[in-house]
Amino acid sequence: HYFLYFPNKLKGSKAMQSDIMTIDEVAEYLKLKVKTAYHLAAKGDIPGFKVGGAWRFRRRDIEAWIHHQTSKDEPNEDPNKKKYKPTL
């Protein structure tokens, strides 16, 4: 048997903590209830995967998902349309 040693991937290391998140961490990050995060993950609405029955999420996938969600909500602006300016 061989033992592979990856010092950057040890539990508790910053590299590991910042890349993979639990359902609780994703819920906190997205400001959701844990139950809502479970529901979204099960439907495939947020990118995640299961390991031994527990949901896990790559931080970069969640950040890309957020970027995609926010960019598709922005309407294409007509350059000839006047922008609303609030009066003070």
Image (tube, helix red, strand yellow):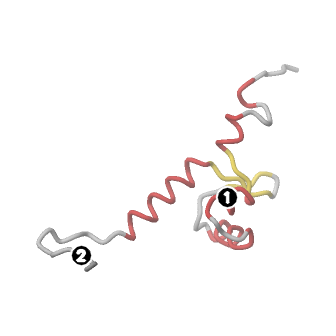
Q: Residue at x 74, y 68 (%)?
A: 34
- Where residue 88 sits in the image (x, y, percent)? 28, 78
Q: Which residue is mark 2?
A: 85
The furthest residue to the right: 1
Q: Residue at x 71, y 27 (%)?
A: 8
The furthest residue to the front: 88
Q: Nearer the viewer, mark 1 or mark 2?
A: 2
Q: Residues within 10 Å of mark 2 (few under 14, many from 20)?
A: few
Rendered position, 21 above or below 9: below
Q: Amino acid at mark 1?
A: Val
Q: Residue at x 66, y 69 (%)?
A: 32
**Between discs 1 and 2, the one toward the N terminus:** 1
Residue 65, numbered circle: none
- Where residue 27 sits in the image (x, y, percent)? 68, 63
Q: Amino acid at mark 2?
A: Lys
Q: Are marks 1 and 2 in contact (CB under 8 Å)?
A: no
Judge from the rendering whether residue 19 lies leftward or rightward of residue 81; answer left or right: right
Q: Which residue is mark 1?
A: 26
Q: Residue at x 24, y 75 (%)?
A: 85
